[in-house]
Amino acid sequence: MRQHTRGRIRRIGMAMGAAAVVTVGLQATSAAPAHAECWSPVNISCVEDGGFDSGDGQFGQGSRHAGLVGYDVDQLVMQKLNDFDCSRLLAGGLIITGAASPLAVYEGATVVSSSTPKAGEPTALAGVDNVGAGSNGTITLYPKHFTETPDNVFQYLPPGTGLSRLPSKEEFQASTVLHEDAHLMGTLGAHTPQQSAAFDLEILSTCFGITKIN
């Protein structure tokens, strides 16, 4: 499921078959690796400059995943996971707190980046190893996650969708991470491209205030 264009935007979604989101991952078109030598669980922070500091950034406090996910993206994810409505969406409409909450699942899960596309699914943005695994699960970010641009968001939404605005690059990437967190929560299981697109639209609306205008 990206640059800062404001106002009303109408684009016709590309054919879902070409941008299919299958099983538990997000897909788009082919991509070149952004982190060509980077593959490591984030608790052994995979950072190109060798440093790690969750710190404060544009969107607030981050998690231990900041070095791999990207500081601003990670902080934006944390901000949205602390939002009541966004958290409830990822929890399937439930109010879940404590160790089983969407926030705790993201903080406890392993996040890795792959230097190569997913085998058999070269257009995948991301995926999880086991639906419903909670904080014991792993989110894998594939090369396309880092290189996809916000204007291609329509590939991950229902055909013909118009949006109130485009997401920023950070919002686009954060929405992918939130989508995968919902898989670890068990809210999303194996799904069709249409089901995935509908959920992505809900994430944009509920978590980022980017609404459907048609």
Image (cartoon, grey):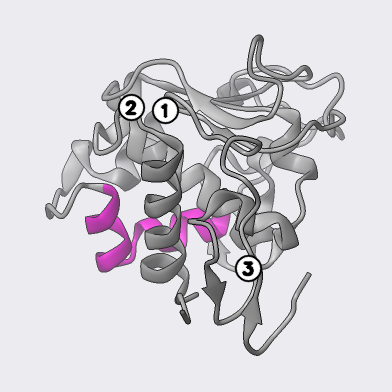
- Mark 1 lies on a secondary structure that is loop
Where residue 197 appears, x then y in whole percent? Answer: 45, 49
Mark pair 3, 2: CA separation:
27 Å
Where residue 159 appears, x then y in whole percent? Answer: 53, 57
Q: Does residue 74 show up?
A: no
Residue at the spot of label 3: 167
For disc 1, the neighbor class at 10 Å (few under 14, some 14 to 19, many from 20) is: many
Q: Tell me the quarter of the picture where residue 130 sits.
A: top left
For disc 2, the neighbor class at 10 Å (few under 14, some 14 to 19, many from 20) is: many
- The answer to if 92 sits in the magenta stretch is no
Judged left or right of residue 25, residue 202 is left
- The answer to if 80 sits in the magenta stretch is yes
Instruction: Please give the name of the residue rendered at 75% of the width and 30% of the height, measured from the top-left corner.
Output: 143
Q: Amino acid at mark 1?
A: Ala
Residue at the spot of label 2: 135
Relative height, residue 206 to residue 126 (above, below) = below
Q: Tell me the quarter of the picture where residue 171 sits.
A: bottom right
* Earlier-in-chain disc, 3 versus 2: 2
